[in-house]
Image: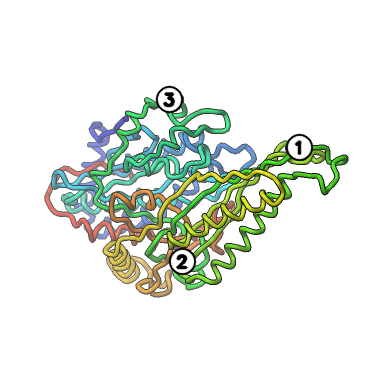
Amino acid sequence: MRRHTRARMLEIILALFFVSSFLLAGASAFCDEAASILDNQTWEYLHDLGGVSDATDGSLQRTFLSVASRLAMNKVELWMRRGGMDTWVDEVGNVHGRLEGAIPNQKVLLIGSHVDTVKDAGKFDGTLGVLVGVSSVKAVILETVSLGQKIPSPVQVVAFSDEEGIRFSSTFLGSRAVVGLLPESAYQAADENGISLLQALSQGGFKGSRQSVRTANLSDTISSYVEVHIEQGPVLEARGESVAPVTAISGQTRLSISVHGTQGHAGTVPMAARKDAVAVAAEIIHLIESLCKTRAQNSNEDTMLVCTVGEIRVWPGASNVISSNTNFTVDIRSRSDQEREGVVKSISGVAKRACFKRDMVCRVDLKHEAPAANCDAQLIIALNEAIVRARGDDETGFDSGQVHGDSRNSALVSGAGHDALALHSTCPVGMLFVRCKNGISHSPEEHVTAKDIAFAGRVLFEFIRARNKPGNSAHNPTIHL
């Protein structure tokens, strides 16, 4: 693990110059500088990272420890350091930026999200939460510098190295390592080139051992975790609201279903004699859709039950060959763990019965499971209060005409899994959703307006400031505007 501190002489000279300019210009200069950071810097950073991709066709893709991922990590760490934070990268590639508190041995408020992406991604998913965190903490540092004081307890921004699970088909690698809950299956998994997690870490310049991975565990030091994230759905846009707190995150199960038949010539095997893996897989997929639609219609709307077949692989995948092996994934989510577990059991039964009927073999494997998580009630209240202050507090300089709706009564349930889900078992978690255009995500069409991003930054700034009002005089960090 490597750390960067603020001990350089040039930075000290810049800090003295910066503080003296505040004292000469007065409080209004601070408001202007902080407002500029919250209103503009996150937007600029987002578009910078949006161009950092492994794909050669112009699309956006960053997977765990890829070349583009490492470049993105370096940029984020640089921005954290320029914002006045102490920085380091842990042994699973998570990037940390910390503002130390005046009172020793206090637990840390952790703010974060992820910098990896899906294939053909949008530039806001995950990255928005990281960069809003960086800008908001930088604005807090500006305030403490102008007052010659230090916040009582530490605040730490973390950019998780892997949440999407694209490379190893195991989600939340970064956040689960931070709370010491990385499962054995993560160590056993291999990417498409047969490289394991520890091998990938070693090749990426890390120690690449189980012991080194365990050093990323911060679970005993975290007071609470807050994540800003695009909604990835259409509700806020329909309500005309920029942001809203999240009350709960749906539980999630990922299954891999394999159908085994008999390979044969497409022109010579009679239809009645075929054991076609594709045909049976298609039947099972249709049955899964019907099952989940019926369950969703008959259950409480708040449970948000959804089922998705997202990946299908056909072997041998030739137009003139009957498939002998077809694999597909099933993603099941619900706010109700009982409902989700019941649907998983039913899907397994549906698959096995369909294969038995055709004298074929099915295998159902559990790839990932995470229980539903309720967000902390006190954090929900605090985020709501921060929304009200950001919307109407003249000290922020924010034009309340830019946002609409009353978020005090508009909390949401998240159907998507987030890093907050991994941290839920260790500490209280809170989430703030930000409106996205047409509810589109995991797509190049993903979009959030600059005004909504600025407002989300102001909400997070107000949240941090309310929970950590400056107190004791102390040495202040260096900030680069």
The N terminus: image quadrant: top left
Residue 217 lies in quadrant: top left
Q: Is residue 230 left or right of residue 409?
A: right
Query: Which residue occupies 47% across, 71% down?
Result: 300
Which label belongs to residue 303?
Answer: 2
Percent of width and height locating residue 407: 38, 71
Tell me the crowding category of disc 2: few under 14, some 14 to 19, or many 20 or more residues within 10 angstroms, Cα based. Answer: some
Residue closest to the far left: 472
Q: Mark 1 or mark 2: which comes first in sequence?
A: 1
Which label belongs to residue 202?
Answer: 3
Question: Which three-letter amino acid code belongs to the residue tagged 1?
Answer: Gln
Q: Could you give the CA–CA distance between mark 2 and mark 3, rounded to whole angstroms?
A: 42 Å
Q: Mark 3 or mark 1: which comes first in sequence?
A: 3
Query: Which residue occupies 21% across, 42% down?
Result: 16
Query: Which of the pair 374/240 is nearer the observer?
Result: 374
The residue wearing badge 1 is 263
Which label belongs to residue 226?
Answer: none
Q: Is residue 59 left or right of residue 64?
A: right
Secondary structure, mark 3, is helix
Question: Which three-letter amino acid code belongs to the residue tagged 3?
Answer: Ser
